[in-house]
Image (cartoon, rainbow, N blue to C red):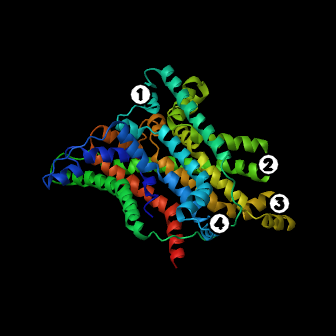
Amino acid sequence: MLAPLPLVFPTFIGAAAFIRTLNPGGLLNRSLDAFGIDFTFQLRGFFGAWLVLTLFTYPYVYLPVAARLRHLPGSLEETARVLGNSPLDVFTRVCLPQIAGSIAAGTLLVFLYAVSDFGAVQLMAYDTLTRAVHSSHLSSPAVALALSLLLLATAGVVVAVERALSARLPADSGAPAGVCVVYPLGRWQLPCQGVVWTTGLVAIGAPVASLADWAVGGLLRSARGGRPLTIGFADVAGAAWNTTLGAALAALLSAVAVLPIALLVVRHRSRLGRLAHVVVISTFAVPGILIALALRFWTLRSDIADDLLAGTLALLVLAYVVRFASLAMGVTLLAVRAVPQSVRDSARLLGASAPRRFATIELPLLAPGIAAGAGLVLLSVMKELPISLLVAPLGFPTLTTRIYGAFTDAFVAEAGILSLVLLLASFALSWLLFLRAGAQRTHAGRN
């Protein structure tokens, strides 16, 4: 249950929480001060960026690997044990080759996310290509373009290498999935639980405690007649509404855009559909800051785009769709493949027209998968920072842009309040999409 939760944290919020917690006057600093311990640690540079990105992106590896482990055929492991292999040998010779593809895919997602991240590296003052692109896009557009091409080439090379390595991995065993084998940890149980709980406390407990400390401290100070908060309920509600509106529109348009592509790929084996599928999936390898800059340059160079889209909500939603539609693509493809051919054939024999079959039979069956894909887009858009910073219209603040602005201007109480609102919304959505189903499976397995 704890392992996937860091996904609800935007990395720049995690970075801000760690920086402020360790600084003089921060939560950890004050707590140790109460015991007479003088401890101050500046979390900056490579180590800070590495720590934050690792803590908040490891679920991209954990989730696919855990899903694969749950469905490994237990018969292969049992056969290996009967042949005298130790548990370690069973893992390295039987399990590891079968989960290598999931590890590679998850690692690629982490790399692409880390390469495209802006907020965490900016707050940690660690120079990366993404940070350099953002700092030069106004003063030196040519430099920003050159750096963008270098960043895109780096991502492309890594994706190509991962694809080549994945193609050389062992094929699936073909054995039917079954109940995974459970091994008693024995004397390793306490150390393993310690690692899990420590990771959870560092990645979840520490940032949440820090954000709550900022928010409560600011509210108490304002109530006692100190410096008033610079935001009110209307500001928080407005940013939350803008975030919800942009994310909902992007999720809806992404679902509408990828459904025809999925139908072309699965039902018609269309070359055009396969090409569109490759293009959509490839956009996940493009950092958000590059998409934002490309759309801005396009609107500046095109009179029609400038008149219709420049400085509008439509351009922001378009940027979100280009960046995150790939998240809905895979889920929608699986949903289309899952519709039984027998159901479609029966409807055809009964004389139903193609539009009627799709509207009354297929669409209800596709709806859960389409909704899950749209939910992934919704959750990702809510946490997006670079696109929101660069493309959002004037007077259209989102929760992420307000949080980033509040922290960089040293209004930590306001940043804490806004961050908690965003985290609660993200957690509620994550629970509905992922965690509830996982909890139900765990409960069913125990029974």
Q: Which mark is residue 353?
A: 3
Mark 4 or mark 1, earlier in chain: 4
Q: Is residue 319 left or right of residue 134?
A: right
Residue 271 x %, y %:
78, 42
Q: CA distance from mark 3 to mark 4?
A: 47 Å
Q: Which mark is residue 76?
A: 4
Mark 1 or mark 2, earlier in chain: 1
Frontmost of labels 2 and 4 is 4
Q: Which residue position is annotated with label 2? A: 269
| Circle 2: element type | loop
Q: CA distance from mark 4 to mark 1?
A: 54 Å
Residue 9 x %, y %:
41, 51
Mark 1 or mark 3, earlier in chain: 1
Q: Which mark is residue 422?
A: none
Frontmost of labels 3 and 4 is 4
Image vertical order of residue 299 relative to residue 326, above or below: above
Amino acid type of the residue tagged 3 in the rendering = Ser
Residue at the spot 51% in from the left edge and 51% down from the top edge: 60
